[in-house]
Image (spheres, grey):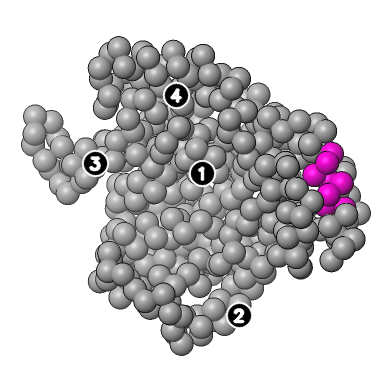
């Protein structure tokens, strides 16, 4: 069996350093908002080329707090891709705004700049480009649109730490950017965590306040916030892993290049890099018109795969009832039964966001993690060839 991902291999190689970091936190007896988090914030700010990094409890918190900090709220619209993890849209709803879904570029799965421009209205307040799978969105063009129209730009870089566009790191192009440290990310915690990156002093100050119940100091709470802090144990672990990120990224890129050679000529859509982009291959995602049959054939051959993501975001059931009802019904359970409105939304998604809908049917992620051995890469490629012959 070749696993889709195996974090035990990563941790085996750095186990002693991880335990030393954890012991350092235990000995300090400071578990929240301490020196480890502050050091990690400095290190990640330097990596992204920004002045501020603010540790938070998850990538979802990063998006939600960043949107609030740049001024998005009720009555606003935020442009976001129709194909992504749901958090890029659900956090817009959490702050009371409305997601405006835009179709994606077929090759990069990112927002298409022309479609973004056509979607801008007088209610548009912000744009959330997603650097999906580790490939940068056309962030230069989207940033220019945001400046022209006076819009906030919040990068969702949850899958793209270390990626660059025109030699400039993602995460430093807009008003704020958001990282996730979910364990399977290229820089993953042993738990959950996230980070907001920004060059704006006002945004940094507000995110720091919001992650700590709106506290302005000495138990003086200036606005509504909540507990959204990155804990010291995760920060210490992430600092150890950050020292290996460059080598891990190089390994992912070598695996991707090897796949590109070994899978050439097959009836598969293979990921690539647009000019000026540096892909970090959080996922190596191929496309096939019979994706489910391909995944089953690979499973039968002992190769683990995953689908990211099988449903376009606007076709998710939570959006099928209408955004106003989603906001009103936050936290209220809904029936699992698929309603007529949800069915019609699925049909509408196919018409309105054809590339997102096509991607949801066709994408399949192959094993691509830094510890994957050369012989395993070759075995995966051989299995893909056999599977393609079978279906």
- Residue at label 4? 237
Tell me the number on the disc at residue 331. Answer: none
Cα distance between the residues tagged 2 and 1: 28 Å
Sequence-wise, which precedes: disc 2 or disc 1?
A: 1
Which residue, given by chain and number where applicable, does mark 1 sit on? 157
Q: What secondary structure is found at the residue carrying circle 2?
A: helix
367 left or right, relative to 337 = right
Question: In the rendered structure, which segment of residues is drawn in magenta?
Answer: 378-385
**Is label 3 or label 1 in front?**
3
Label 4 vs label 3, nearer the camera: 4
Residue topped by disc 2 = 351
Q: N-terminal of the two: label 1 or label 4? A: 1
- Residue 227, numbered label: 3
> How far separated are the C-alphas under marks 3 and 1?
22 Å
Q: Residue at x 25, y 20 (%)?
A: 30
Quadrant location of residue 341?
Answer: bottom left
Q: Is residue 43 above or below residue 108?
A: above
Quadrant (top left, top right, bottom left, bottom right) of the C terminus = bottom right
């Amino acid at each position: 069996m070749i696993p889709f991902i195996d974090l035990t291999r990563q941790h085996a190689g750095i186990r002693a350093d991880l335990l030393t970091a954890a012991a350092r936190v235990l000995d300090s007896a400071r578990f929240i908002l301490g020196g480890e988090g502050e050091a990690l914030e400095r290190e990640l700010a330097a990596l992204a080329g920004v002045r501020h990094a603010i540790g938070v409890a998850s990538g979802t918190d990063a998006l939600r707090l960043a949107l609030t900090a740049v001024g998005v709220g009720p009555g606003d619209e935020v442009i976001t891709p129709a194909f992504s993890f749901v958090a890029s849209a659900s956090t817009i709803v959490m702050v009371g705004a409305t997601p405006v879904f835009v179709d994606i570029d077929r090759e990069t799965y990112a927002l298409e700049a022309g479609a973004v421009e056509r979607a801008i209205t007088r209610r548009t307040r912000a744009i959330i480009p997603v650097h999906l799978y580790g490939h940068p969105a056309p962030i230069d063009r989207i940033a220019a649109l945001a400046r022209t129209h006076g819009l906030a730009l919040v990068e969702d870089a949850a899958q793209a730490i270390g990626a660059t566009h025109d030699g400039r790191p993602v995460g430093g192009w807009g008003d704020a950017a958001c990282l996730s440290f979910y364990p399977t990310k290229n820089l993953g915690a042993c738990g959950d965590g996230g980070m907001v990156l920004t060059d704006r002093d006002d945004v940094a100050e507000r995110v720091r306040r919001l992650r700590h119940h709106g506290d302005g100091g000495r138990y003086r709470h200036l606005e509504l916030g909540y507990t959204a802090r990155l804990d010291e144990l995760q920060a210490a672990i992430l600092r150890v892993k950050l020292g290996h990120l460059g080598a891990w990224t190089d390994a992912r890129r070598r695996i991707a290049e090897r796949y590109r050679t070994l899978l050439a000529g097959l009836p598969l859509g293979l990921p690539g890099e647009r000019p000026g982009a540096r892909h970090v291959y959080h996922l190596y995602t191929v496309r096939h018109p019979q994706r489910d049959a391909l995944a089953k054939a690979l499973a039968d051959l002992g190769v683990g795969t995953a689908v990211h993501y099988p449903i376009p975001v606007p076709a998710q059931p939570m959006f099928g009832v209408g955004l106003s009802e989603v906001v009103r019904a936050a936290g209220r359970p809904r029936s699992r039964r698929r309603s007529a409105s949800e069915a019609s939304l699925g049909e509408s998604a196919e018409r309105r966001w054809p590339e997102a809908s096509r991607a949801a049917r066709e994408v399949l992620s192959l094993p691509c993690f830094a510890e994957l051995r050369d012989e395993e890469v070759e075995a995966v490629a051989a299995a893909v060839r056999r599977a393609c012959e079978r279906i």
